[in-house]
Image: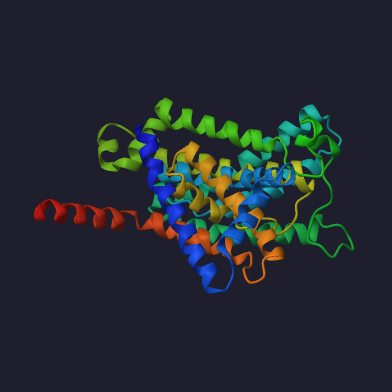
Amino acid sequence: MPKFARELLFPLIAVLAAFIVGGILILLVGDNPIVAYRLLLGSALSWPDGIGYTLFHATPLIFTGLAVLVGFRCGLFNIGAEGQLYIAAFATAWVGITFANLTPWLLIPFCFLAAILSGAFWGAIPGVLKARFGSHEVINTIMLNFIAVALVSYFTQYHYKVPGDPIMQTTMIGEGAHIARFGKFVPGFPERIPLNVAFLLALLCCLLVYVFLWRTKWGYEIRATGSNPSAAEYGGISIRTQIVLAMSVSGALAGMVGINEVLGYRYRYYDGFSDNYGFTGIAVALLGRNHPVGVILAALLFAALQHGGIYVDGFSEHVTKDIVQVLQGIIILFIAAEAFFKWLLGGRFLMQRLRA
């Protein structure tokens, strides 16, 4: 069995175990788990709405999962993807509003750069603090999340909000900044579904992250730093440089959520748009074993659960959409307890050998 397939084996077991435990909980509340799971997964796989919305919800999770992945590979825990995507989404909207008269051939690349560079900048701040002063990135990124959310809320409310609009959102970006939805070039796919080319960009980023981490000198140095900082430094690798680089790349990837949200969906910045994408990205990276292919699969699973939870809430008698959070929590619990299960299975195997 290939190494990567072996790496995905335990997450698969964790998912199956989570569904079994979830099924027991559904039985305890007096509902049929088969019916509930049919609603949960069947609605997410229906064409075109189910698949369209599942892929749409998976797009930001792929970006944030990759962001956390890059940090993990350098031995860093980037909890700041939430703040980074908020800063990037607002910066994207600001460019789309300020330069609305530009031709699309210029405006769209400028908006892309705004999302990537602003996210990278916000990710580099905790990287510099970690590299220069030894300040822990977890504390820094958590605090920067609060600062980012408060900062963009202030500018939205007092400088870019539509006068008289009760909703906390900016004015519309220029039409030249709109990116195409799948409905424009996929036959039979309705344009009302907000799935857009940002999903293809997310898949491209998965390929680029793989090439960057496993096929380039910079990626090797990042992975070496994460595996053994002392040995990497002894080998001539600058640990400080790798920390800043990894956090910057991580922030840039998280910032691309703004492309999907602002350019392909709402066409403006909407305050509070994130459904905890940054924090769910941590779970996506863990379930995906910190590999781009695993991130895609985990993001699709979490997106399917998120979309299917709406139907469970509407058509199930006793089960609500909270079952989605329960399943996600159990999956992560099993992933976190991997060492315990390996020890348990290893101990039983050893006892059987001794008895034999």
**Is 74 left, or right, of 107 in this rendering?**
left
Residue 64 in view (yes/no): no
Horizontally, is 2 left or right of 21 in the view? left
In percent of width and height, residue 10 lies at 38, 48
Left/right of residue 114 with respect to residue 15 in the rendered view? right
Q: How many marks?
A: 0
Residue 310 or 118: which is nearer the viewer? 310
* Residue 195 quadrant: top right
Give residue 349's position: percent from left, percent from top.
19, 52
- Quarter residue 203 falls in: top right
- Residue at the spot 49% in from the left edge and 58% down from the top edge: 19
The quadrant of the rendering that contains the N terminus is top left
**Going by the image, does 72 lie left or right of 307?**
left
Taking the spot 22% from the left edge, 52% from the top edge, the residue there is 346
Q: Nearer the viewer, residue 125 or 264?
A: 264
- Image x and y of residue 188, in percent: 80, 34
Q: Nearer the viewer, residue 295 or 128?
A: 295
